[in-house]
Amino acid sequence: MQDLVQKLEQLWNRLKEIGEFLNLDKLKNEARMLEKTMAKPDFWKDAEKARETTEKHAGIKKKIENFEKLEKGIKDALAIARKTPTFSPPIPTPRSEQGEMEGVREEIEKKIAEIEKGVANFEVELLFRSEYDKNNAIVSFHAGTGGTDAQDWAEMLLRMLSRYAERKGFRARILDEHRGGEAGIKSATISVEGQYAYGYLKSEHGVHRLVRISPFDAEKMRHTSFALIEVLPELAEVDIKIDPKDLKIDTFLASGHGGQSVQKTESAVRITHIPSGIAVACQTERSQAQNKDSAMKILRAKLFQIYQEEKEAEKKKIKGKHKAAAWSNQIRSYVLHPYKLVKDHRTEYEETDPEAVLDGKLERFVEEYLKKDQKPKTKD
């Protein structure tokens, strides 16, 4: 049992460091202050502000509960491991007692695996330093050149990120989608809601390259396809102010797969920001007002991206962090033929099971990106 005791003590030290960084007393006090605010009679007078407050409170409470659960798990497992006697040859041990100890050991090993996963998740969250990492995310997918293959690849990436969001307990909603003629999508935009959604998803911002035998090629030739993913934080009105006079708002019929009309009223909304020329659309919500609200969220995110790029250009730091994704800037390659490999070109991290990655197993890619992103940059 001594090896298990050592593992648990190491986990305890890691968790202790996390606790010091989180400042649990401060978090608990913040939760109490939010609860007082939520208890006020006029709390729901401003629905948007109330929603933000309840989400913030829920996030803090979840963080405290997860930490205390890990703390209790380590203490309980340590108590059992330290009380369980360790026998080794030449001391004879009754078979029934050996079986009992093996059962206890298996249970502790299983508990250690659970605790290790929880501690690792906390350590990843400590890498979130950006002001907007805690925000929801707006993710857009664009098929590159290559016709049906590229459109199919864009849809595969949409599924990959949706599955990853599901694994993280986030809520993903399609805001806008333009289907391809034969298969796949020309473009799509989704909203991903959850604590640190943007922080977890920002690693996917860039061009993704796929090499495979094309299912759409009668001669079964190998094709290379490209698709672009844009990941932006969802922002509130106070973060990006937009003059209503700068907007052109059009409404149109929402459409389903194949271009068929799904509503008789013009509920879909397209908003054009005249000074920048940016146009965004949303057609999946039930009402025109809801579509307009979602479109405005996308517009704020895109204007924020422009602002950030200009800010980075002024500081002459464009060449590194989260610049606008260009088609020549490939961040990751997925090779399905003649061998199987997924490689991230920014971190050099790779995996040999592309099917699992495409099914949403992105945790290590995200973790490696965040670790690299926190390394100090060399001065120009």
Image (cartoon, grey):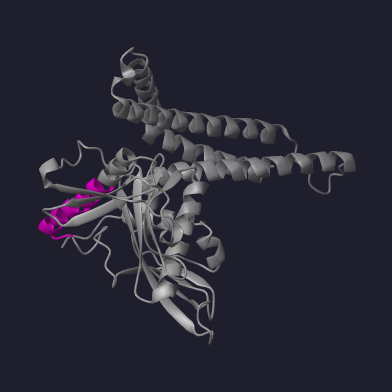
Q: How far from the left and from the top, in percent, is residue 331?
A: 36, 66
Viewer-closest of 229 and 187 = 187
Viewer-closest of 13 and 143 = 143
| Above or below, 115 relative to 216 | above
Q: How far from the left and from the top, in percent, is residue 237?
A: 21, 37
Is 340 displayed left or right of 274 in the figure? right
Q: How far from the left and from the top, in percent, is residue 72?
A: 57, 29
Residue at far front of view: 264
Residue drawn at (53%, 76%), measured in percent from left and top? 215
| Above or below, 83 relative to 241 | above
Dividing the picture into quadrants, the one containing residue 158 is bottom left
| Above or below, 266 relative to 359 | above
Dividing the picture into quadrants, the one containing residue 278 is bottom left
In magenta segment, residue 261: no
Span of residues in magenta = 298-317
Residue at far top of view: 41
In magenta segment, residue 305: yes
Q: How many marks?
A: 0
Residue drawn at (28%, 43%), measured in percent from left and top? 292
